[in-house]
Image (cartoon, rainbow, N blue to C red):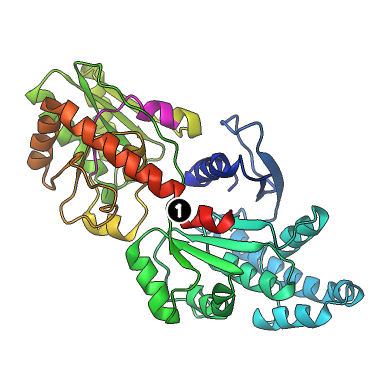
Amino acid sequence: MKSPRGHYLDNLIESFYFFENDFSIYCLLNEVFDPQGTFIPKELKINKILNRNNFEKKEKKFLHYLFEIIFFFKRLISSLILIPYFIINKNILNYLKALLSNNLILPRYFIELFFFLKKNEFTSYDHILFQTTRNKHMSLANFLTRLEKNIPKIHLRILYTPSSKKLRGFFYFLNKIKLFLINKKIFLYVLTKQNFEILSNHLNIKNGIFLSNIPWVFFERKNKKSFKTVGYMGDARVSRGFNKLPSLIDKLSKTSKDFKFIIQYSKVDIAVKETSDKLFEMAKSNPNIKIYLKYMDYKEFRDTLQNIDIMPILHDAEEINLGNPSTIYSSITHQIPMTIPSNLKYMKDVLVHKSFEEADAIDNIVDKIVKIKNNYEEYLSSAKKNSSILLNIFNDDPLKKNIN
């Protein structure tokens, strides 16, 4: 990441707090990373050493591909330059085997990471965590693990459903690390049962593959207000139900004056611009509507969550079941009653108590939000119980067990 926007830095800070009492933690970031004044824990040791292609394909296609071509030859030449180093260190055979497994070229970030590990004297008793694993990280994990026995254990978090389209893509490297999964040198973590089944069925094993959760801060909610604040936080996308907000707000406002609204998003594309403009027009005449069109850092995001009483999850159920809806996580951890789409499979092992109502159509969502408002203590009590379930799951999470 070049800047703090998005979930990457947020997840990094969560992981830091999750493990800070057990380890010294080093964070490796893009060499051009600019925190832009956002919140970062003072104790977190940041090392800006990773050389990434910072030309986005959509914005600067020519420069993006030019960088890729230059970087390819740079890694190819570097693979030859490093041969004397591994001869001197009596590890040339493993190095050549690792190169062969990666088509005779160094993986991205190898030089930065490998010599960082050497400089700081990391061993097999230490751990490397890739928080959002892409194909390049799979390649790097495969290479490092073949190189030395004393390499730290590698933990790869898979946030999304892997694609099988690329010839040398995710499943290509998944096949290569199968033995290391069995030998407990590499560990894979997925968020959904569907992805667990995809990986385990592909490899025909379950060794080294775990259902895991992303760590999250917890908040104790109290019911002191006569009014109730309905919230929307995250990306402004059609698939997340953003375009439903004007109608939802209008209908809820007509049912009661005790509804307030907090809407937060940071980007507006053409598919949601009309809706965004309409929301700002509504806010001009309705003081109960607060719109934050900006990125919120770790602290500000959670402070805002504390002011939301009811969170309608407006996604389609299918998208949630396949993806990583952080809004549901944050609602559970912050004890916020929700409306959720029907036929939702995701997080049903946590949503045991009735802290939610199922609804899909706008009128139905409105009715269910009103129902939650009128019986808020009951839904809040259930939300607290579900939050406790998730906290226990975090404390017993496979990632924490495998690293500790």
> Relative to 95, is 290 above or below?
above
- Residue at horizontal 11%, vertical 30%? 370
Residue 241 falls within the magenta-colored stretch:
no
Q: Position of residue 293 (x, y in %)?
A: 39, 31
Q: Residue at horizontal 27%, vertical 38%?
A: 385
The verdict on residue 310 being magenta is: yes
Q: Give the x, y percent position of residue 382.
A: 22, 36
Secondary structure found at label 1: loop
Above/below status of 259 relative to 85: above
The residue type indicated by label 1 comes to Asp
174 to the left or right of 282: right
| Residue 339 location, quadrant | top left
Regarding residue 52, the answer to whether it shows in the image is no
Give the magenta range.
Answer: 301-313
Which residue is denoted by mark 1 in the rendering?
397
Pick out the residue farthest to the right.
88
Identity of the residue drawn at 47% across and 61% down: 189
